[in-house]
Image (cartoon, rainbow, N blue to C red):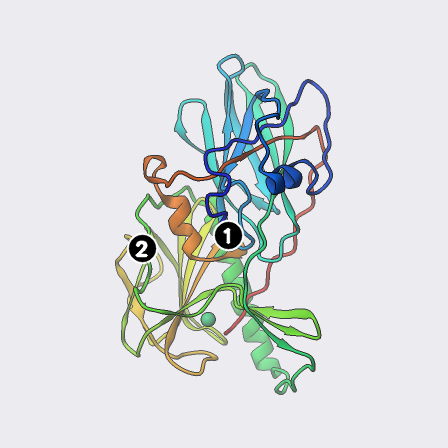
Amino acid sequence: MTGGVLRGIIWTVPIVGAVLVFGPGSFLAEADASGATASQPVIRMDPEISWSPAAPGEGRLFTLRVVASRHTPLIGVHGAVAGEELHFGRPEAGTFESIAAVPVDADTVVEAELRVLFESGGEKKLTARIPVTRGEYRHERLTVAPRFGAPPDSADQVQLERDRARAASVSAAAHRTPRLWNERVVLPRSSRVTSGFGDGRVFNGQVSSRHLGLDLQGVQGDTVLAAARGVVQVVEPFLLAGNVVYLNHGAGVVSGYFHLSEPLVSPGDTVEAGEPVGRVGATGRVTGPHLHWVVRYGSTSVDPRSLLEVSRAPAERPETSEGSCCVVRGDTLQTARPDVTQSGR
Ligand SMILES: [Zn+2]
């Protein structure tokens, strides 16, 4: 997190009827580093695009907001960040808000490509360049690649492909489903984290695989809780993940609970935050019982704990830094970033 360095400050970049283009890390990165704001002109954009925190972390969810002025009211906002469609709610009149995800191996900037629809009938395309804070991931550094096991046989290949397709279908369903969850988000287990999100193995300076979930300690049979309200989308044995339960929370958000000894729900069930969905186990490719907890925005895996932060009601959010800018008008849309592949640890 940004640790409140930019607490209470709103960055604003002037847009005065012109196309302004900032290279990666130019304006915002400099302002960020110096912390100097007093001398910057504050000219409100219309609509105003802002986000919090000011520099969201790699592999984390954040909140994106579009606020219309009274003079040019909006009837809709559409868009995408890093190739994932956004789903804007309207927490108050004139304000559109969506959560969005920074991919785990993002560049120094992610772009929000937005299309705003005015009540008067017109529309405008806007691109906001959002600075990204590097994740502090642990890496196991190896200078020589280890000997890999035998490649999966063809039956395993078929199952791996099927598992990937099932996971992708959950992500697609979540983008088609309206938001089902509310501010209540809980940890599926209140136990110790045994392996953090994003930790990776580095072979010869290259990150070869990342841990795209959060491992929570547990013994065989311990209860696993739904992190948030949602609909059970998949309950199946996967090759690497073992018995999985996937929940579709809508508005793009998915959670997954891997290596279960026993699922306690069925596809189509609606579960509330904190309801049991399964029991801790050691199914799939694991060395011992634990819960591997996954949260994805579409197919972008994020640190599951960031779901707790973005789900708070506006009044309950801690005072935090906020970024704001918007820079390119009528830009062409950025192509989607390839999906982050799933790790089976
Ligand atoms: Zn894991």
Quick check: 299 above or below 75?
Answer: below
The residue located at (50%, 52%) in the rendering is 60
Separation (CA) of disc 1 from disc 2: 17 Å
- Residue type of the residue flagged with mark 1: Arg
Rendering quarter of residue 137: bottom right
Disc assigned to residue 60: 1
Quick check: 236 above or below 143?
Answer: above
The yes-or-no answer for disc 1 within 8 Å of ligand 1 is no
- Residue type of the residue flagged with mark 2: Val
Quick check: 332 above or below 236?
Answer: above
Crowding at label 1, few (<14), some or many (≥20) Cα neighbours within 10 Å?
many
Locate residue 7, reporting x and y percent.
46, 38
Rendering quarter of residue 139: bottom right
* Front residue of 117 and 112: 112
Dot 1 and dot 2 residues touching (CB under 8 Å): no
Horizontal relation, residue 279 to residue 241: left or right:
left
Locate residue 194, reporting x and y percent.
41, 72
Locate residue 170, reporting x and y percent.
47, 56
Q: Is mark 1 on a helix, strand or loop?
A: loop
Q: Can residue 232 be seen in this view?
A: yes
* First along the sequence among labels 1 and 2: 1
The residue located at (45%, 44%) in the rendering is 251
Horizontal relation, residue 27 to residue 303: left or right:
right
Horizontal relation, residue 338 to residue 344: left or right:
right
* Front residue of 6 and 233: 6
Disc assigned to residue 186: 2
The yes-or-no answer for disc 2 within 8 Å of ligand 1 is no
Locate residue 325, reporting x and y percent.
60, 31
* Front residue of 137 and 123: 137
The residue located at (39%, 79%) in the rendering is 282
